[in-house]
Amino acid sequence: MKRMLFSALALLLPVLLLSGCGGPVRPDGMPDLVKATVTVTQDGQPVEGVHLTLFLDGPGKNWTVFGDSDSTGKVTFCTHSTDFKGAPAGSYIVTAEKVEATPSQFDNIEVSNMEEAQEIEAKRRAEYRPSYDLVNPELKTRETTTLTLSITASGCDPATLELGAACREMFIPEGSAPEPGIDPADVIEEVQMSD
């Protein structure tokens, strides 16, 4: 019996030591967080895959507050990282983004060594691929968004953020460039005609 207990403890000890104690370290100065959820809709319907970022509207330290909508449109906010659920109470400017990226011709290519992998990754990054905003692009930036949200101990106001009409507006992601001598406007026009 003692031998079995000793064996069980010997097996558990490494697990306990490797798991750490207490979880992630809370950043210095992080305010108290309140549970904060909101529903995101587009054309009155819940929408999945929208990334929201909150910016404090007023004085104070602006902590990174963010969340992504699930299949029911529900967003549960986190602060600093996904380890810290909730958000500091306050009034916020909200940005919303949902992007559809054009697949790369270099996606899913099997490579046999690190050199090939680096070469394919370099080609993929240099590839000129348009992407599409699936929510109003004006909601993407702090300077142009019209969305606001107040978070208190009793929840979010408003409880639902309406993003307006669905869209599919093309843009060229930063760092994506056409081959020398190709005008980006020509590529956009060509892709739009093929859609």
Image: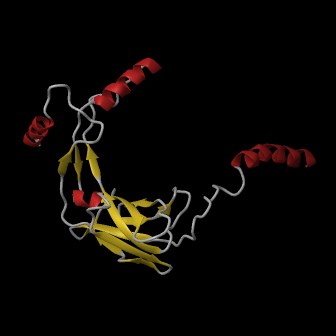
| Left or right side of 108 for 33 | right
Residue 25: image quadrant is bottom right
Q: Quadrant of residue 178?
A: top left
Q: Position of residue 131 (x, y in %)?
A: 24, 44
Q: Is residue 143 above or below residue 115?
A: below
Q: Residue at x 76, y 46 (%)?
A: 17
Query: Residue 68: x percent and y percent?
Result: 39, 59
Residue at the bottom extreme, as displayed:
154
Q: Is residue 161 above or below residue 18?
A: below
Q: Position of residue 125 (x, y in %)?
A: 33, 31
Q: How many marks?
A: 0
In the displayed image of the protein, which residue is found farthest to the left? Answer: 193
Q: Residue at x 13, y 40 (%)?
A: 188
Residue sitting at the far front:
59
Rendered-image quadrant of the C terminus? top left
Q: In the depicted view, which residue is nearer to us: 74 or 174?
A: 174
Q: Is residue 137 left or right of residue 37?
A: left
User: Which quadrant would residue 26 be assigned to in this image?
Assistant: bottom right
Q: Please give left or right for residue 34 compared with residue 110 in the image.
A: right
Q: Is residue 5 shown above or below 108?
A: below
Q: How is the image coloured?
A: secondary structure
> In the drawing, does residue 81 fall left or right of residue 18?
left
